[in-house]
Image (cartoon, rainbow, N blue to C red):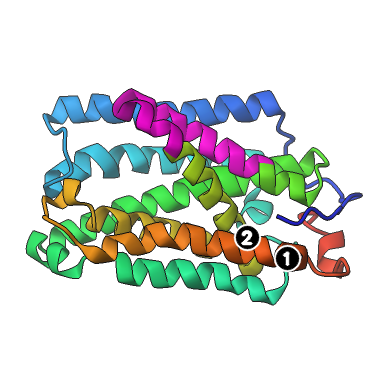
Amino acid sequence: MDIHKHEGQPRISGRQLSYVAFAVIVIAYLAIIQFGGRLIAGWSNEDDTLTTRGVIFTMVIPLGLALIFTYGVIAALGWWRPVLKDDRPVNRWVWVVPAILLVAILVGIDYSALAEKGWLFVLVLLIATQFVGWGEEGMFRGIGVTMLRNHGLREGQVALWSSLIFGAVHLSNVFGHGASAVPQAIIVSLAGYFFYLTRRVSGSNALNSVLHGLFDFALISGSIILLDQTSYVGAFAPILAYPIIAIVLLVKRHKIEPSQPTDNQTIASST
């Protein structure tokens, strides 16, 4: 990633958030999903996502609670504008990042397998994955990026640390997936950077949130573990998107940031 200095940015309006306070917020967010999810699943006697009822109790309810928590924090901080809007644009060619993600999503969805599960299952799973997208993007690309910017970090540092934090919190999956959570956290860090760039090139936190949810939807729909399939070749599309985007960004890393700071960058998040 290209690290350009964008210093001298005015602080955002609303409450201030320390690193420690942000860590506490993230831990609470994870607790809702990890431990709250287990409690809800145990209470409902549902421990898988193979049925509509299972998706509701293991995903929709805990993820919905985490989503409410995330946007409740945003409201309490008074950070609606800096979280939902991004006034620090990148060069327009960076639209290639969300474009590749969208293609991977469209190819990666196993339409025939989902048709067998029924429309209600598909709708509930789509809602659950959108809860993931809007919740995680609100927490890490929204609150996280805003907090790092407000502490005066250069934009390259914001990109790096917000992505690393995003990857690190996925180490909490070690409780359910063991050591496989480690390489997952590394991959998720890379995905975090892709969503960060999507936020900046689109100028808001909406497109990255929607794409994040759809990307998870595609991954789940093509999973032989979830839907008990033999194979689905399209499931490799979301996986291949990572190295393709990474190569593009590596080649054009010096052309991500505008050559000259724009007027919007000088007033970023100040209103």
Residue 212 in the image, given as x and y percentages of width and height: 44, 56
Q: Amino acid at mark 1?
A: Ile
Residue to which mark 2 is pinned: 197
Residue 72 in the image, given as x and y percentages of width and height: 52, 40
- Residue at figure coordinates x 38%, y 60% from the top left: 238
Give left or right: position of 12 versus 10.
left
- Residue at figure coordinates x 15%, y 42% from the top left: 54
Dot 1, how many residues are within 10 Å of its Cα: few (below 14), some (14-19), or many (20+)? Answer: many
- Disc ID at residue 256: 1
Q: Are marks 1 and 2 in contact (CB under 8 Å)?
A: yes
In the image, residue 135 lies in the stretch drawn in magenta: no
Q: Of the residues under marks 1 and 2, which one precedes in the sequence?
A: 2
Q: Main secondary structure of the magenta part?
A: helix
- Residue at figure coordinates x 65%, y 60% from the top left: 250
In the image, residue 174 lies in the stretch drawn in magenta: yes
Q: Is residue 134 visible?
A: yes
Give left or right: position of 161 versus 242.
right
Give left or right: position of 114 versus 259.
left
Q: Secondary structure at mark 1?
A: loop
Dot 2, how many residues are within 10 Å of its Cα: few (below 14), some (14-19), or many (20+)? Answer: many
